[in-house]
Amino acid sequence: MELQSITPLILTWNEKPNIERTLAKLSWANRIVVVDSFSTDGTLELLRRDPRISICTRRFDSFADQCNFGLLQIDTEWVLSLDADYVCSDDLIREIQALPASPAANGFAASFTYCVGGRPLRGSLYPPRTVLYRRAAAQYVNDGHGHRVVVAGGVGRLSSTIFHDDRKPIADFLRAQTGYSRLEADKLRTASPDDLALVDRLRRRAWLVPLLTPGYCLLWKGLLLDRTAGLLYTVQRTYTELLIAMRLLDYRLRNAVARKERMQDLIVRPDVPELRSASTEQIERPLRTAPRDPTR
């Protein structure tokens, strides 16, 4: 595959600590499309130094919408979709070059080597992701706190990895998890179990995954051997799972309290027709449709 037939697509928002490492591995690209959500930390100044980069600013609404907007700015047949903390390995670029000029698959997924503080870990919970695809066959959809690309046609697998190397301060991670955990909990509550992967069905139990995560990371994935970096990754993943579990349990408790209060009203005020005829669905509805506290 000719590298000139590929345009890298990157989303940014305050990615100054990461973006230079990502761009350093894209020296082969004729053009790079960046969709920026009005960064204020110097990211835009770094991007403007490279004449190959087309910067498109768009106010963030969702990851999927940002990516779909970015696809409209690309005119090559193929797209290499990267987060601002993804660093392509040299082996990955060579493998892409070795692909046929017109492969049968419309997309290719890659695995990731997760880094903490620049140190590669021997394992992680980060799943493979479709990163290379034909532009005309791709459409992004939201998926919990993140997004995924839906590719019409077959998706192959690349054997080389991408380094996930986020070096933003830990405070940024903690702030992000507040919103991410809400979106993930909403997805788990509202999705049909048949539409969820096994790990998400386990997450719906609320208590199980936070208890399993430390042992799974440290022992099964071998992160105990990565010492401080492996321990930090394990704590981060466990923290995220705890936040999701707390939101699920909080919702269930509030829903149970609201249902109990409505049932008490039925007993105390049986003469009120609206209460007498209220179904379980009506009893639960006030909590589900109540305005969300933006600080939660």
Image (cartoon, rainbow, N blue to C red):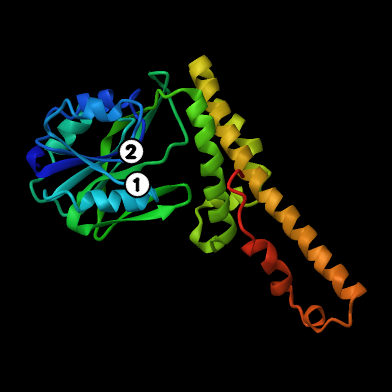
* Quadrant in the rendering for residue 218: top right
The disc, 1 or 2, on the residue closer to the chain's N-terminal end is 2
Q: Residue furthest top?
A: 227
The x, y position of residue 157, in whole percent, is 27, 44
Q: Is residue 105 visible?
A: no
Dot 1: element:
loop
Q: Tell me the number on the disc at residue 59.
A: 1
Q: Are marks 1 and 2 in contact (CB under 8 Å)?
A: yes
Q: Is 289 or 223 nearer to us in this picture?
A: 289
Q: Tell me the number on the disc at residue 246.
A: none
Residue 295 vertical placement versus 234 (above, below): below
Q: Is residue 251 left or right of residue 123?
A: right
The x, y position of residue 119, in whole percent, is 40, 18
Q: Quadrant of the N terminus?
A: top left
Local crowd size for mark 2, using a 10 Å CA cut-off: few (<14), some (14–19), many (≥20) = some
The residue at the point 70 percent across, 49 percent down is 250
Residue 96 vertical placement versus 187 (above, below): above
Q: Which residue is mark 2?
A: 38
The residue at the point 69 percent across, 73 percent down is 281
Residue type (three-letter) at the residue carrying disc 1:
Arg
Q: Is residue 58 left or right of residue 90?
A: right
The residue at the point 10 percent across, 38 percent down is 3
Q: Is 201 or 67 nearer to us in this picture?
A: 67
* Quadrant in the rendering for residue 14: top left
Residue type (three-letter) at the residue carrying disc 2:
Phe
Q: Is residue 208 visible?
A: yes
Dot 2: element:
loop
The residue at the point 43 percent across, 23 percent down is 121
The x, y position of residue 116, in whole percent, is 43, 22
